[in-house]
Image (cartoon, rainbow, N blue to C red):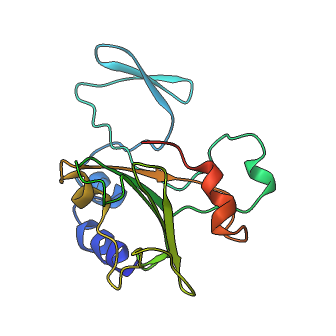
Amino acid sequence: MDHVRATIQQIAPVDSVEALEKASVAVRIATARFTGPGSAEIDGTTLRFRQALVATGASPAIPPIPGLSHVDYLTSDLKVCWSHGSSDEPVMLYSEVNDEGYEIRKVEVYRDGQLDYANAIRSTGTTQLSDKPMPNIKEIIAQAEFSPTISVLPSSRRSIEMRLKYLIEC
């Protein structure tokens, strides 16, 4: 998280609401819908413009999954499908990652259905937690053999074996 905060501080002078307003840009933080060339409805009011800049961002949100609001949930679960021809390597990697980017639990699923896992206390097969932070999602996507997704699953209070039923095949 320190890296994210540092990056935000670095770009804020040129990429922030304050910087845009200083450059005479009328900033609206709202829900918008383009209604035609040069017009948009922004929170129920139609505005006209010559040019529009749509700057979107993201913030954590709880997905609308029935029952999720009644359990604790994780926001840093990473599932990576790995396309390769080896029967000795997993085809799906599932990692629970802490705020610093380090794996705290990992499950590896093999082509034949075998599962190996690792956590801070024990591991099975050759599965181990990495001693380095996980690469960011862009770095993973850049490698053609990997297809990552971020998942939201029930609380870590459940055992890793219980969590396996939530995994989806690649």
Q: Nearer the viewer, residue 54 or 117?
A: 117
Q: Quadrant of residue 4?
A: bottom left
- Front-lying residue, 55 or 160: 160
Most foreground residue, 116 or 43: 116
Residue 132 image offset from top left, x and y in percent = 32, 82
- Residue 132 sits above or below residue 106 on the image: below
The residue closer to the viewer here, 107 or 71, is: 107
Kindly identify the residue that appears in the image at 51 percent across and 79 percent down.
123
Query: Horizontal placement of 162 versus 5: left or right?
Result: right
Determine the residue positioned at 36% across, 52% down.
Answer: 91
Where 74 falls versus 62 (above or below)? below
- 50 versus 99 height, above or below: above
Q: Residue furthest right?
A: 70
Left or right, 118 with respect to 137, comes to: right
Q: Residue furthest top?
A: 36
Q: Where does the image place residue 35, in percent across and percent down from the top left? A: 41, 14
Instruction: Locate the C terminus and report the quarter of the image it occupies.
Output: top left
Q: Position of residue 164 (x, y in %)?
A: 61, 56
In the image: residue 167, left or right of residue 145:
right
| Residue at the image position 46 percent from the left and 29 percent from the top | 32
